[in-house]
Amino acid sequence: MMDSIYLIISFILAILAILIELYVIYSILLSRFCKYPPAFPTFGTLRKKTLAEAEKILSQSSKNLKVVDLGCGAGGLLLPLAKKYPNHQFVGYDWDWFMVKWAGFRGRKLKNLKIIKQDISTVDVKEFDLLFSFLDTKALEIVHERIYKEISPSAILISPVFALPKTQAIKEIEAQSYGLPLKIYVYSKSRNNL
């Protein structure tokens, strides 16, 4: 009996491993050979501290804010915030059709959340008050110059793990996760840093 259970569990794990590998191959091909990276969720302390920093901004705001996640993946940052702060508007953009569908399905009951499939380098960021950008350095180089020019003077940009090129953060938050020495970078154009 126990051997059958172990066999079933091993089979399920093997299928999951194959599906993950197929997703990585799919995302590499569809992302124009890593122009944008495969979806990689924020995790551990990094996720908790990123959400905590966003919650400070959202809870202290006297007006309804527009929040965007450039490269939202499955919505790991937007979904908990949209649930907790129904008066603010949340929009996630991602290039990956599968991730957009998955995030949209997970947030289908939230009236203040939109998930859109779009090349993030073409997103108009002027209207957003709070921006997330969990992009690797290659993707950041693609979108940074345009963000620099277009972001609202009062906007805050939170970038977990990857610092924006040639830009000074107003705050760096230590966010070691699973032994990895990670940081969260917070930027504000109004403080002449973005």
Image (spheres, rainbow, N blue to C red):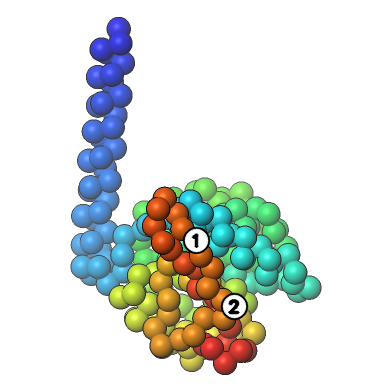
Per the image, the residue denoted by label 1 is 175
Left or right? Give the position of 165 relative to 47: left
User: Residue, x 28% and y 32% (percent of image)?
Assistant: 13
Label 2 Cα neighbours within 10 Å, binned few <14 / some 14-19 / many ≥20: many
Amino acid on which the number 1 mark rests in the picture? Ala
Residue 5 image position (x, y, % from top left)? 31, 16
Q: Which mark is residue 47?
A: none
> Could one spot residue 44 in this view of the protein?
yes
CA separation in Å, label 2 and label 1: 19 Å
Asked if the residues shown at circle 2 and circle 1 are in contact, with their CB atoms under 8 angstroms apart, the answer is no
- The one of 14 and 186 positioned closer to us in this rendering: 186
Query: Mark 1 packing: few (<14 Cα in 10 Å), some, or many (20+)?
Result: many
Image location (x, y in percent) of residue 60 = 75, 69
Q: Position of residue 1 (x, y in %)?
A: 30, 7
Instruction: Determine whether 31 is above or below 145 in the image.
Output: above
Type of amino acid at the residue the image marks with label 2? Ile
Which SS class for mark 2?
strand
Of the residues under marks 2 and 1, which one precedes in the sequence? 2
Residue 18 quadrant = top left
The structure residue drawn at horizontal position 48% and vertical position 91%, both measured from the top left corner, is 149
Residue designated by label 2: 156
Q: Going by the image, does 139 lie left or right of 115?
A: left
Q: Can I make out residue 115 in this image?
A: no
- The residue at the point 25 percent across, 68 percent down is 34
Residue at figure coordinates x 62%, y 60% from the top left: 52
| Helix, strand or loop at mark 1 | loop
Placement of 133 over or under 74, stated as above or below:
below
